[in-house]
Amino acid sequence: MKAFFSKLLHDTLARVLAALAVAGLALLLPGVRSVLGATLEVPAWVLLVAFLCAGLGLAHVLVGKVVPRHEREYREDEIDGIIWRWRYKDGALSDLRGFCAKAGCDTELMLQAHEGSVESGTRSFRGTTYYCTSCNATKGITNAMDLPDHERRKIEKKIRDGSWKKTAAKI
Ligand SMILES: [Zn+2]
C-alpha cells in the first residue's frame, strides 16, 4: 500500500512538474505574455466545461489507480476444510497457502500430491494430502493433483460471481 501511494505521488508530481515546465516555456513567448496581461472575459459555461474536463481527467486517473474491493477485503477463505490465504499481484492471485483450520492451530500445512497407481485392480489414493505438523494429522482430497491451483479456480469463481462478499463478511 505504501509503495502504491509513493508511486501515485511520484507520477502526479512528475505530471505537475512537466506541466509547470511547459507553462514556464510558454511564458517566454511575447504573445502569451500579452494575453496574460489583459483582462479576459470568459463566459461561465466555458469555465464550467473546463472544470468538468479537469474533474473527469482527475477521476479517470484516480479510478485507474484504485485497487478493486475484493483485492482489499478478500484475502482469506476456508475451502475444503483448509484456511487459504493469498495476495494479489497485477490483479491475479499469488502466494496461495493453506493453513490448518482446527481451532487455535493455524499452522501452515504441508501439501503433497500423489499420482496413485493401480495394483491388483485396486487404485491407491490419487490426489493431494495435507499434513499439519502441530496436530500431527494428515487428510487427503482425492483427485486434486495441484491443490492450490484447484482452490485458486474456486476462489476466482467466487470473485467473478460476487459470492466472496458473503465470505469476507463472516471473517
Ligand atoms: Zn493443525
Image (cartoon, rainbow, N blue to C red):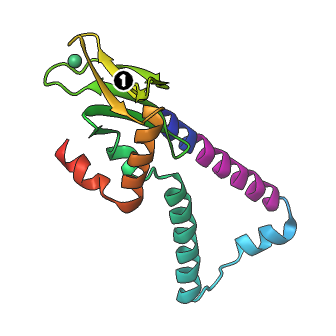
Residue 47 x, y percent position in the rendering: 56, 81
Please state, as top left, top right, bottom left or bottom right, where the N terminus lies in the image.
top left
Quarter of the image for residue 76 reads top left
* 164 is higher (above) or lower (below) than 96: below
For mark 1, what is the residue?
129
**Badge 1: how crowded within 10 Å, few (<14), some, or many (20+)?**
many
Q: Is residue 25 left or right of residue 129?
A: right
Question: Which residue is pictured at 72% across the width and 71% down the height?
Answer: 37
- Residue 138's x, y, as percent? 28, 18
In this image, 56 relative to 127: left or right?
right
Which segment is the magenta one?
A: 10-27
The answer to whether residue 77 is left or right of residue 41 is left
Q: Position of residue 156 (x, y in %)?
A: 43, 50
Q: Nearer the viewer, residue 92 or 109?
A: 109
Measuring 70% from the left and 55% from the top, which residue is drawn there?
Answer: 19
Answer whether residue 20 is magenta in the image: yes
Residue at image x 35%, y 27%? 98
Quarter of the image with the C terminus is top left
What amino acid type is highlighted by mark number 1? Thr
Up/down of 119 relative to 41, above or below: above
Q: Is residue 13 above or below residue 48?
A: above
Q: Tell me residue 78's x, y (percent).
A: 26, 38
Residue situated in front as seen by the camera: 142 or 50: 142
Of 48 and 36, nearer the camera is 48
Residue for point 20% across, 13% down: 135
